[in-house]
Amino acid sequence: MFECADRPKVFRLLSIFLISLLAIFPLSGCTEYGKLLAEPFVRVGQYISYKSEGGWEGTRRTFTEWVEEERPSENFDDREGIGVYGSAGDETTPGGLTEQDPIADFEELKPVGFVNYGEFDATVRADTFIPLGETALETPSGASTVSVANDGVGDWPNSSRYLSVPMGAYSWCIDWTPGDLDEDGDFDYFHYIQNDPTILDENDSDDLESAEEVAISVPPISGVIFKGKCKENLVYDNCVELNSEVKVYSLYAMEQGNPPQIKVAANAAQQAPPAGINVTFGGVSTGYGSGMILWQEGDWVEASTSDSYQALGVQVHGDQTIGWARVLFDGLEIWRGDTSSYIIAEGRHGVYVEVRCFPPGTHSIRIEGLGAEGSGGGRSIPVSYFCFRE
């Protein structure tokens, strides 16, 4: 029989045991790792969700967004009840329920810092989480931070290496990019799981200067390295009992841990789409490799299919000198915005717009240039590809 004073020790031991078990059964996808000069990776998350109840022509629509900074009011378009920018808050579902970030359910948060002793900058987020005083796993916060490598330039460790999370036991997922290893034009990403559990409790400081710190190394000194980013990136749930919705991400879809199964080049003349999918374009749009460039207002490229898919998406990817665009699903505008304001990584801008959970039938997703300058001073829209999720 344990006395009350022994309970914290029992919890710590049990938490460590449970997370250690998870580390024994790693994700599939082990890969060889090569070294190139690292490109600094900075994630700026912007999450937008638009839902339509009763079909795309339904009477009730809900639009919300999580943003890290205020946006100018002139960038709000309510002509069809669709806002380009919204206020921070909970996502409202058609049933009136709310979906909150798991962090909102906990009142007290503790900071934890990450010191990177490796050679590449790393993005860190929670992989598993057991709340303090509990024994069952719960969904961790999706927050992430960047821990820079010591390259001899600037301050190290960097002052922004902290996360504020609820108290409990954690394992961490660390991802990074060494560059374009296979020279296919896309950055390659890898990740590993930090095996040693981190326990945050009442004894940990609330001040950053005295916060608990976790040592990481990128690449890791030992252990399994997996291909792709950490698994949180593309949110995808079963479409059962869900109405059509749109998600907008500041990321490159095919570099994620949960990418769509089918990637279709935007330039069909360069790379023909698979059977059952058609890609067409209009205006003065021109091909650039496997992608298409929309140069002026009214230029467009579209993918359509009658096959059964649960999600369709379109990827914009370029430098900061790209402009405003809009996306239409079955002829209805579902999103518009400044594509240069979405940051994928340092020097890489663009947005991924995905429509999901729509009824069977013939569907199309079109991206159209608006001919308006983005924050980087450009107007063109580089469309990389369309995605289809089965």
Image (spheres, grey):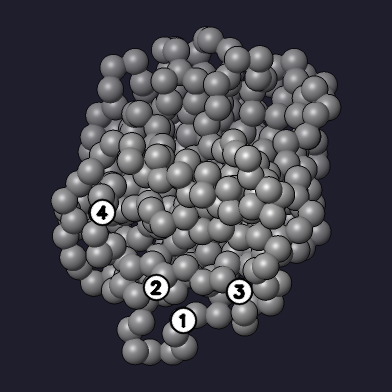
Residue 374 versus residue 275 in the image, above or below? below
Amino acid type at image mark 3: Ala
Residue type (three-letter) at the residue carrying disc 4: Gly
Dot 4 or dot 1: first in sequence order is 1
Give whichever of discs 3 and 4 has the lower sequence position.
3
Name the front one of labels 4 and 1. 4
- The reply to whether the C-beta atoms of the residues labelled 2 and 1 are less than 8 Å apart is yes
Give the distance between the C-alpha atoms of the residues marked 2 and 1, in whole angstroms: 7 Å
User: Percent position (x, y) of residue 79?
Assistant: 80, 39
Which structural element holds mark 3? loop
Residue 174, position in %: x, y? 40, 57
Residue 172 vs residue 136, the one in the foreground: 136
Q: Earlier in the sequence, mark 1 or mark 3?
A: 1
Q: CA distance from mark 4 to mark 2?
A: 16 Å
The residue labelled by disc 3 is: 211
Q: Residues within 10 Å of mark 2 (few under 14, many from 20)?
A: many
Q: Quadrant of the C terminus?
A: top left
Q: Which mark is residue 223?
A: 4
